[in-house]
Image (cartoon, rainbow, N blue to C red):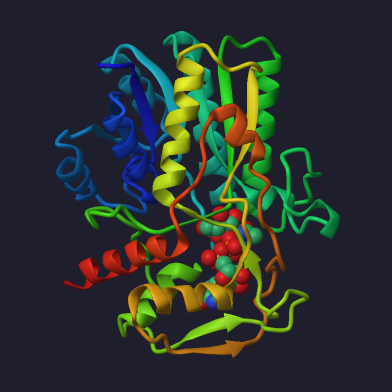
Amino acid sequence: MKDTVLVTGGTGFIGSHTTVELQQAGYNVVIVDNLSNSNADVLDGIEKITGIRPAFEKVDCCDMKALEAVFEKYNGIKGIIHFAASKAVGESVEKPLMYYRNNLNSLINLLELMPKYGVKGIIFSSSCTVYGQPDAENLPVTESAPIKKAESPYGNTKQVNEEIIQDYVNSGAPIKSIILRYFNPIGSHPTAYIGELPNGVPANLIPYLTQTAAGIRECLTVFGDNYNTPDGSCIRDYIYVVDLAKAHVCAMARILDGKAEEPVEIFNIGTGHGVSVLELINSFERATGVKLNYKIGERRAGDIEAIWGNVDKANKVLGWSANTPLDEVLLSAWNWQKHLVK
Ligand code: UD1
């Protein structure tokens, strides 16, 4: 058995997939989650896949006392992967203080506890949202591209959290950190035992698309076809959640095996390819054989025209790459949607 890793937000979409990959790589996982946007049944799904039920504590990372009790109880936590955060862009505009309180306090609490309990490193879930709309000459975007002023309180919490980690480590704290800037995570585990569980009407493309295909929503609206892109729709770098989960295992091993070269390292985690909304719809129809009801609508306020990542650094330094074909990824999202409807 390898080291014990604490996964905050481990019953969420990316957290649950990462727990599976960590367990399959031999790590012992302890999950903390306040279940504000997920549900404890996810633990059954994880256990069905790996044969191991992860330890679980229903704890809010903003609650310092309860969080510290977890470190006391599971003596010997060596690494943390911190997913627990509020993540809806629109909601963050309406409830900024909730976003700042949740997303900043939880990280600060974890950082404060790390030296006391001998935790060596923390992997932080950041986002390509920190780049805003990169200038055309900066696409695909590298880790050294300028950070743009955040478009939302959610985006700002990602930027500020990155700075908090940098400042704390620079102050001489005896910890290391790897910051992963995700592009657009999509898809589900191939078993369809775990996947994305959107709350209410989905704001993100894939859950809206699969719910439309399943007849739960009437029609998918493509937000604009008059952008300066080859087919006029927006371009993103859609990364398969299982590939993304594996990047966390590589990053954790890099810290725990003492291979990290800098105290804080930053990696883009994407495929390196941009795909437009219309291309994605075509790919979904091809992969699943399901005809999608969609229409072209107005642009969505705040949307970025085109962004995709340069992932050379993650490929070379982390020894990781995303290699699942998009059709397969979309089929996994569809299989999960069908599983939900059952
Ligand atoms: C947003 C966040 C990102 C976060 C991601 C996943 C910003 C700027 N972006 O990304 O940080 O990591 O969510 O939670 O904060 N679209 C449609 N119709 C729909 C829904 C979406 O055409 O019904 C289009 C959008 O215009 C966009 C693409 O699909 O071009 C992807 O949208 P979405 O899934 O919401 O993700 P992002 O906005 O890219």
Residue 119 placement (x, y as % from top left)? 45, 14
Q: Is residue 261 left or right of residue 340?
A: right
**Quadrant containing the N terminus in the rendered view:** top left
Residue 305 in picture, x, y percent from top left: 72, 68
Between residue 147 and residue 22, name the one nearer to us: 22
Residue 82 visible in the shown view: no
Observer able to see residue 287: yes
Residue 75, image x, y percentages: 30, 12
Residue situated in front as seen by the camera: 39 or 24:
24
- Image quarter (top left, top right, bottom left or bottom right) of the C terminus: bottom left
The one of 107 and 288 positioned closer to us in this rendering: 288
Say whether residue 35 is left or right of residue 305: left
Looking at the rendering, which quadrant does residue 166 occupy? top right
How many callouts does the rendering have? 0
Does residue 78 lie above or below 132 as drawn?
above
Q: Residue at x 71, y 64 (%)?
A: 306
Q: With 6 as the anchor, is 270 left or right in this view?
A: right
Q: Relative to 48, does residue 124 appear above or below in the rendering? A: above
- Ligand 1: give its quadrant: bottom right
Q: Position of residue 261 (x, y in %)?
A: 64, 16
> Quick check: 304 above or below 53?
below
Using the image, determine if residue 224 lies above or below residue 8. below
Residue that appears at 54% across and 62% down: 91
Q: Residue at x 46, y 25 (%)?
A: 252
